[in-house]
Amino acid sequence: MAKAVEGLRLITEEGLRHDGRRPDELRPVRMEVGVLENSDGSALVEFGKTKVMAAVYGPREPIQKYMVLPDRAVLRVRYHMAPFSTSDRKSPAPSRREIELSKVIREALEPVVLSEQFPRTTIDVFIEVLQADGGTRTAGVTAASLALADAGIPMRALVGGVAVGKIEGVLVVDVDEVEDGVGEADLPVAAAPDIGLITLFQLNGVLTREELDRALEMALGAIRRIVDMEKETLKSKYQVAGEGEE
Amino acid sequence: MSMTPYRLPVIPSIKKETYLSIYSKGLRLDKRDLITPRRVSIETGVIEKAEGSALVRLGNTQVMAGVKVDVGSPFRDTPDQGVLTVHAEFVPLASPIFEPGPPDENAVELARVIDRSLREVGVIDLKSLAIRPGDKVWIVWIDIYVLDHDGNLFDASMLATMAALYDTRLPDYEEYETGEIELIRDRRTDGLKINHTVVTVTTAKIGDFIIVDPNFDEESIADTRLVVAVDEAKRIVGAQKTGDHGLTREELSRAIDVSMKAAEVYFNALEEAIGRRVR
């Protein structure tokens, strides 16, 4: 976590943020699919300096034969941070934070993956945070959604994620590391707007009931935009592939 | 790595239908209504060797929390603060679905949700835990021990944690000229400086219903659960969706509303156990 710089104001008198963004403005977002050769589907997602890669393998034979379900695929998800992704080196061994985030990210994807179409198989989603600058779990969900679609896995809808923070009393969307380090609250949300489902919801910090409603509203608005970008990204790849030599 | 649970008990779909048809009458199988938690009992001081302890029964769920304290070094970035650590063990005696071994993702998640619910709002004044700022501070270990799993481990664990923190008395100590500090564990002194009281309320979405405090059977047919942490001033101090399905905006909102109401029941039980009002 970034340390607060003494006396630094994170919201200016004009209501702008330390990097000049408006409260409801995302960082520059970049999305790319098919970035890896070996995996069945892959994606690279950037929100500002946050850089996350996801790869999907499957549906495939489970490595351990007993880890199967007779009526659906087993979804396996790993969220992992590269040792060089943070200011202080992060040990590559999975931390308790990574164990928890792997779980909530899997649970953010379960509602949209049509796993019942692939009984007795495994679908693996591997998320690597290459650079962490806030919002890595929600960027991870976004990258995973793209990678699943890129792998051709049937889904009910695409999922996108973003975190809303409360910084110096102001609700802001897509918090970066500096804001996260000093914020009063952090609300990571993932949703599938096309089917009206919130699939990841965490609150770290303190909000009133009314603030929570407004923060959720902001998150869902931003997620709508993020999912639209996902669709554009997928369209542009597959339109080119259709016309080209692939 | 997180995996779709593949070892959970198989639930006949007829069972789910039975539950849903009873819910539609506003009732539960154990005769509760949809938004009332099970009977809560909280006993403090159950482990004399721990600096603080509590046993919580929530229906047939039993969770014990123990607080142990040590003297140690502060973290470099918070030299004037004590250290708070929350750990949860789902020990195999508590349920046929628990296996011996290191904490799995469910135990890790539970401990981290409770840790954040305590930390973010500042339940414990960590500055008051500095003995010699920058050098020696109190390290507070909260260990959550699930003894009998009949659902809703979050709420039972949070109540046990809160009650054990209120029960905690720091040991006396001797400070030598060398700077060493020796604890005298059988002489207890002050309690912890507790600034806020937090409970969590877990709701489950089952079909179109939102129910409070699901038991084990209800959890196994639940689509998903929401844990909401509420403090004595009715602020929301933490939340976590846990489970393989999603929630609509309306369901989420409804779940938060009933959670804030049900929190009263837990606060009443907690106040009775610690013998004073916190609201």
Image: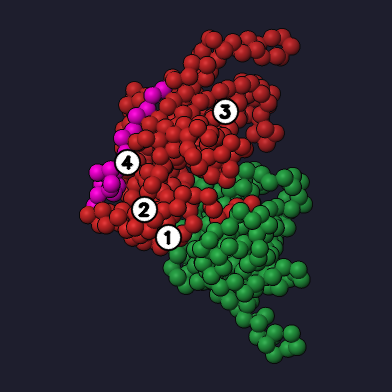
Chain colours: A green, B red
Q: Looking at numbered disc 1 in the image, what kind of residue is underneath it?
A: Leu
Q: Looking at numbered disc 3 in the image, what kind of residue is underneath it?
A: Trp
Is residue B69 visible in the rendered structure shown here?
yes
In this rendering, is residue A24 above or below B147? below
Mark 1 element type: loop
Residue A130's x, y, as percent?
Answer: 73, 58
Q: Which residues are magenta?
A: B26-44
| Subunit under mark 2 | B
Find disc 1 in the rendering and name its residue: B247
Do pointers 3 and 2 mark residues of a single chain?
yes
Magenta-span inclusion, residue B127 = no
Picture disc at residue B141 = 3
> Which residue is rendered at x = 55% and y = 48% of the image?
A183
Find disc 2 in the rendering and name its residue: B255
Mark 2 element type: helix
Q: Looking at numbered disc 4 in the image, what kind of residue is underneath it?
A: Pro
Q: Looking at numbered disc 2 in the image, what kind of residue is underneath it?
A: Ala
Are the residues tagged 3 and 2 within 8 Å (C-beta)? no
Q: Quadrant of residue B264?
A: top left
Point out the tag, 3 or 4, that comes first from the N-terminus.
Answer: 4
| Subunit under mark 3 | B
Residue A177's x, y, as percent?
Answer: 64, 52
